[in-house]
Image (cartoon, helix red, strand yellow):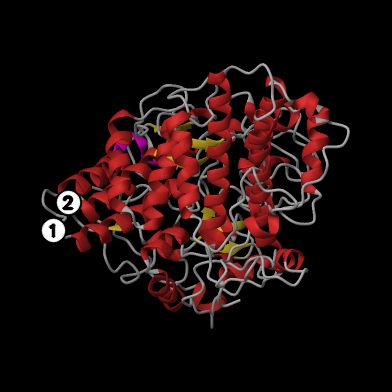
Amino acid sequence: MNNINLKKVLIFIGLITLLIAYACSPNFLDKKPIGTLNQTILANENGVQGLLIGAYALLDGEGGNVNSGWGSACSNWTYGGVASDDAYKGSTPSDQGDIVGIMTWATATTNGYTSQKWATMYEGIQRANDVLRMLKIAQGISATNAADYAAEARFLRGFYHFELKKVFGNVSYVDENVSDTTAATVVSNVDGTGAYINIWPKIEADFTFAASNLPASQSQAGRANSWAAQAFLAKVYMFEGKYAQAKALFDQIIPNGQTASGAKYALEANYGMNFNAATKNSPESVFAVQMSVNDGSDNTSGASNGNWGDNLNFPYASGPGACCGFYNPSQTLANSYKTDVNGLPVTNFMTGGNVSDPAATPYSGNLDPRIDWAMGRPGVPYYDWGPDPDASTGYSWIRDPASDGVFSPKKNTYAKSQVGSASSVSGYWAATELTSNNVNLIRFADVLLLAAEAEAQVGSLTTAQNYVNMVRARAANVGGWVYKNATYSASSSSYSPQTTPADKYAIAPYPTGAFTSTNVAIAAIQRERQMELAMEGHRFFDLVRWGIAATVLNNYVATDPISKIFRLGSTFKSTSGIFPIPQNQIDLLNSGGKTILKQNPGY
């Protein structure tokens, strides 16, 4: 979607007025009158396309409106990352206090971050529904184009509901037929008995419709195509535990799938290319949020196309960015990259010393090379910024080492050579934290590992191992490793000369027959997802759907050196896998005395 990445500035002024009406709504169902923009003006192809662009615009979680904020970031860095063992909150203990509740699994029903996520996702749903409503009365649109627009709108509606389902669990499904008179009966999250309504089938239906009606390729790289819809549908099936249905889709996606631009799905040659503005929309990018800077959208209101939702997540004070020191990778995550003499993952990785430990004898064994793309480590080259500062500078890129550890976020940042091109040059207070780095919502490595999981559950253990080894083989490509005393090239995400690896890297495929049982295979796949998708907002949701969140996260509190201090007393409970529905929404919808929205258990 090369043009849609200018999404906010391209929508004509009248349409912006229309969309702002949604942003100011007191609850997620309130539909303001169109006002000066009557339906006649929008009931044509240009109007429908404008509404569709508006629906795409909220993929970044922001949209430049009062509902937006860091809590609605499309990367899910708070819910998927900080709530898991991937990362600490960062900054100082009291900064952005709403994250503390998320981090300690004690989120208040009045938490501002969860309110932002709820409101922004439902606004995206309303925008998608407006496309479908307008298509019913629009004139002059060919049947082919109308089917495409409807399929894109339903893809987006499915995506926004999927996000809500992952974060909040027991949510309402809202379609284009909801009106002021039907809202009370149509959008309740409970049935007549008070039991929560399962909306998974309706999410499935949206992605199924999109998969059947979208073209295989699109004119713009960021638009949804049929293969992206199939990938999301397969992922929905994985969340539901419908492994056979997911496997059937993966059997088609992996050999035949292609990007919206028509490139066959494939792993990038170098792992780091997935997190580089210079190589975005690659064959590995199944579906991504399109980001851009210096396009006229970067202003002091934060209404930017440059991944505003992640602009806190940069090294502190210097280097790439100038603020703010949030989202520091955890010691547990660093330790998870330990490998044995055969280049395979170490099982009990919290024993035998900590990786890059500043306070004791650090671990000195082998490491998976992906560690140095997932995080900045003291003394290790950080793109072309030089070595990440170590103890000699007081870990100057870390705002508060006592609570943040010694690792820096990296996947959302950029190279020094990209300053001014991949970063904003506007006068915004955090301009250097606005980037044109896309956020991958699904990439091909994610697809392969989900497919491996489905195979391990209902298919072939050999195929499951082959899929995992495809991901590991890419990580083993020495051309994509980090090297010391070398020059970094942003155009290829590689270093030269490749003579001195930054650490004792060792990684190898699993040997033939290593996946001896479903349990062995699933454990290996879970570990592979932890390493491959680190800091990409997936970890918490994976732990919850696997049913191991309590075991893993309570152990994390007990063993991680930072979490032992700053999560002291925190316990992940059976009800902690979803976050509370914002209380203000419950109060608004239930004000008539009938329960339309029922709070999640445990809150």
Q: Identify the residue at horizontal 68%, vertical 20% (top origin).
A: 45
Sooner in the amino-acid sequence: mark 2 or mark 1: 2
Tag 1 residue: 516
Q: Is residue 330 magenta?
A: no
Q: In the image, residue 159 lies at what x, y percent?
A: 53, 45
In front here: 453 or 325?
Answer: 453
Label 1 element class: loop
In front here: 163 or 425?
Answer: 163
Q: Please give the label number shown on residue 567.
A: none
Rounded to the nearest whole Å, what is the CA distance between mark 2 and mark 1?
A: 8 Å
**Position of 40 relative to 86 (above/below):** above
Q: Specify the amino acid type for callout 1.
A: Thr
Tag 2 residue: 461
Residue 286 relative to residue 188: left or right: left
Mark 1 and mark 2 in contact (Cβ < 8 Å)?
yes
Label 2 element class: helix
Q: In the image, residue 51 lies at what x, y percent?
A: 69, 31
Toward the left, the furthest residue is 513
Q: Which residues are magenta?
A: 477-483
